Image (cartoon, helix red, strand yellow):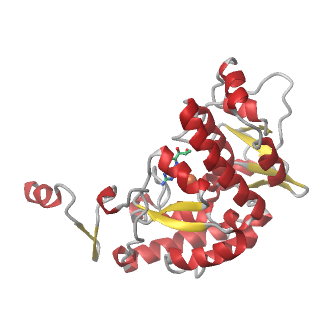
Amino acid sequence: MKGAKAVNAGVAPVTYGEGTRPPRGDYARARADYTCEQDYAQYTAADHDTYRRLYARQVQQLPGKACDEFIAAVAQLGAPERIPHFDDISERLMQATGWQVVSVPGLIPEEAFFALLASRKFPVTDWLRRPEEFDYIVEPDVFHDLFGHVPLLFNPVFADYMQAYGAGGLKASRLDACELLARLYWYTVEFGLIATPQGLRAYGAGILSSAGELTYSVTSNEPERVAFDLRRLMRSKYKIDSYQANYFVIDSFDQLFEATAPDFTPIYREVRALPTMEAGLVLPGERRFSPNAV
Ligand code: HBI
Ligand code: FE
């Protein structure tokens, strides 16, 4: 054991499975904007197989649970049996909405993240979870980032919303309002639901890349589901270690884009004057959305 520890110390590559890869969190290979080359040589046959199994499990669950815009675009990720080359996706994405996918070594600082979004670049973590993390991983990996986030970037309205979010984030950093703005990201980009004539559908990446939460979010009686309201949402804490206790439901991506277009400076002031709400609370008189029948 002592020997292994010494070998793995510092930033030396670690041996894993059939291949050798940089350890997670090797930010030394990143540029000043935190982007890096997609280290395609790191992926082993086992990684491609893990990706293929994650993709297959998730894609078969989409009908009736994911929004139509997501389902229509998921094929744009390319062949489902291998981890895609980010450059191939960028080519198609650039044509569709002017976005690009860029590689990052993992979570990056908020300001760098916002700056990339504001320039229509979506940061995708280049490493994949290990097989023992198949069902759940704490940090974003290549599967969450690509499968969860990238399909909706092919939708023009959602693509504009993401850029506006990034620009808003740069401003929020100056106003010390990142905590409030992060709640908007969480409850829309990661865990958003949309109401359609056919019922509730998921559009958030955290839901769409999760094996269990996709069904839970649209059919379970446990969580609360209330209409999207910017101030109400910004007051609401969220869960990071379990399925969400509440979801916010939009009517359309246009509604989302328009609701978040105004200058947030006075909104942050209003929200700070109101009490923060624990996850899962519903206020008297709030309309609740019923789950889809199963
Ligand atoms: N970095 N790679 C990566 N991916 C994210 O989703 C991410 C990040 N850094 C910051 C960040 N998200 C958050 O601050 C957002 O909640 C706003
Ligand atoms: Fe995410």
Q: Residue at x 35, y 78 (%)?
A: 41
Q: Quadrant of residue 294?
A: bottom right
Q: Is residue 293 visible?
A: no
* Percent position of residue 159, x then y: 70, 60
Q: State whether residue 126 is above or below residue 138.
A: below
Q: Quadrant of residue 20?
A: bottom left
Answer left or right for 12 relative to 115: left
Q: Residue at x 67, y 69 (%)?
A: 98
Q: How many marks?
A: 0
Answer left or right for 250 relative to 266: right
Which of 153 and 71 lies nearest the eye of the viewer?
Answer: 153
Q: Residue furthest left?
A: 3
Which of 150 and 63 lies nearest the eye of the viewer?
Answer: 150
Q: State whether residue 61 is above or below residue 81.
A: above
* Percent position of residue 80, x then y: 57, 78
Q: Residue at x 75, y 35 (%)?
A: 230
Q: Residue furthest right?
A: 197
Question: Where the N terminus falls, by quadrant?
Answer: bottom left
* Percent position of residue 241, x then y: 51, 41
Q: Residue at x 66, y 30 (%)?
A: 236
* Percent position of residue 21, x then y: 29, 69
Q: State whether residue 67 is above or below residue 80.
A: above
Q: Is residue 287 visible?
A: yes
